[in-house]
Image (tube, rainbow, N blue to C red):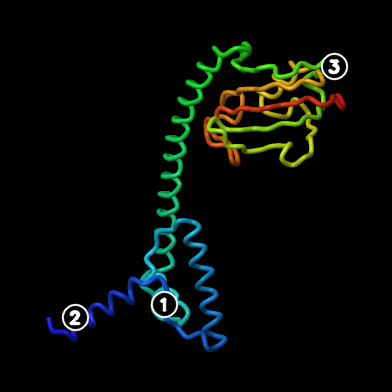
């Protein structure tokens, strides 16, 4: 290969492997096109979509110019459907695997935690520890209570906290997770308890929001008041 060909090959490699494209944004149309491309690129990146950019650009060009497409609308719909089903199946498999891992980790944690000083276990499997025992009345399941709380995963990740918001929360005790409904009824007003809640008393195998599937949860709960009864 002569020197000129080698230089041309190196230049081609550099052009197609660089992270930025040399383009003059010297017209409004070019700027608008670039902005739309930025939006598309960010969306694909954020969604983790594994897409061939050359095919993407070719489809945009052909569609925009009303040229013949390489796929029919029906074919595209079928491919899209199959891709979505594949992604959903992969996510479900990942969630199931994560859920099983979390379940095993939670069972191990609770078994060890049950032997620690001060930790008590109820018939349902709820574990709790008294930090401060208050002297007020205890709520019933039908009461609305006012509490401060902090919730963490087993690795210490805090997923919610009224302390962080500097604002206690009020809720009907029979409209929260079973571990809370049972546990807070054990607390006289003025108490602070730690609760260790297995998935079946929390958010189960589906999880919820920042809480992964089959998570065992740790809550610090302070009962401030009993506000009302249904």
In the rendered image, which quarter is residue 8 located in? bottom left
The one nearer the camera, 103 or 225, is 225
Q: Mark 2 points at which residue?
A: 6
Q: Residue at x 22, y 82 (%)?
A: 7
Q: Quadrant of residue 10?
A: bottom left
Q: Tell me which residue sits at (51%, 71%) in the image.
A: 38
Residue placed at 50% from the left, 58% from the top?
46
Provide the secondary structure element on which disc 3 rests. Answer: loop
Q: Position of residue 119 (x, y in %)?
A: 62, 14
Is residue 179 shown left or right of residue 57? right
**Residue marked by disc 1:** 21
Other residues around mark 1 within 10 Å, as few (<14) / some (14–19) / many (≥20): few
Q: Identify the residue at the far bottom of this view.
A: 27
What is the CA distance from the residue labelled 2 to the residue labelled 1? 22 Å
Q: Are marks 2 and 1 in contact (CB under 8 Å)?
A: no
Instruction: For the C terminus, give its image quadrant.
Output: top right
Dot 2 or dot 1: first in sequence order is 2
> Is residue 25 toward the left or the right of residue 178 in the image?
left
* Quarter of image, res 226: top right
Q: Determine whether, in the image, residue 68 is placed left or right of residue 26.
A: left
> Mark 3 highlights which residue?
136
Compared to residue 191, the image places residue 1 above or below, namely below
Quadrant of the frame with the N terminus: bottom left
Residue 88, percent from left and from top: 45, 47
Q: Residues within 10 Å of mark 3 (few under 14, many from 20)?
A: some
């Amino acid at each position: 290969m002569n020197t000129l060909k080698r230089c041309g090959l190196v230049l081609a490699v550099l052009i197609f492997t660089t992270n930025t494209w040399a383009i003059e944004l010297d017209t409004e149309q070019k700027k608008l096109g670039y902005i739309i491309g930025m939006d598309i690129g960010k969306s694909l990146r954020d969604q983790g979509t594994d897409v061939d950019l050359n095919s993407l650009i070719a489809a945009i060009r052909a569609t925009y110019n009303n040229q013949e497409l390489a796929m029919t609308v029906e074919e595209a719909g079928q491919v899209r459907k199959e891709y979505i089903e594949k992604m959903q199946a992969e996510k479900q498999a990942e969630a199931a695997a994560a859920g099983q891992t979390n379940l095993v980790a939670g069972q191990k944690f609770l078994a060890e935690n049950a032997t620690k000083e001060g930790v008590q276990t109820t018939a349902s499997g709820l574990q709790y520890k008294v930090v401060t025992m208050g002297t007020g009345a205890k709520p019933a399941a039908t009461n609305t209570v006012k509490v401060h709380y902090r919730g963490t995963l087993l690795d210490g990740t805090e997923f919610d906290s009224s302390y962080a918001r500097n604002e206690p929360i009020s809720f009907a005790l029979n409209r929260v997770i079973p571990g809370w409904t049972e546990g807070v009824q054990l607390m006289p007003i003025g108490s602070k308890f730690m609760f260790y809640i297995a998935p079946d008393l929390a958010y189960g195998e589906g999880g919820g929001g920042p809480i992964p599937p089959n998570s065992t949860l740790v809550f610090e709960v302070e009962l401030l008041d009993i506000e009302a009864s249904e």
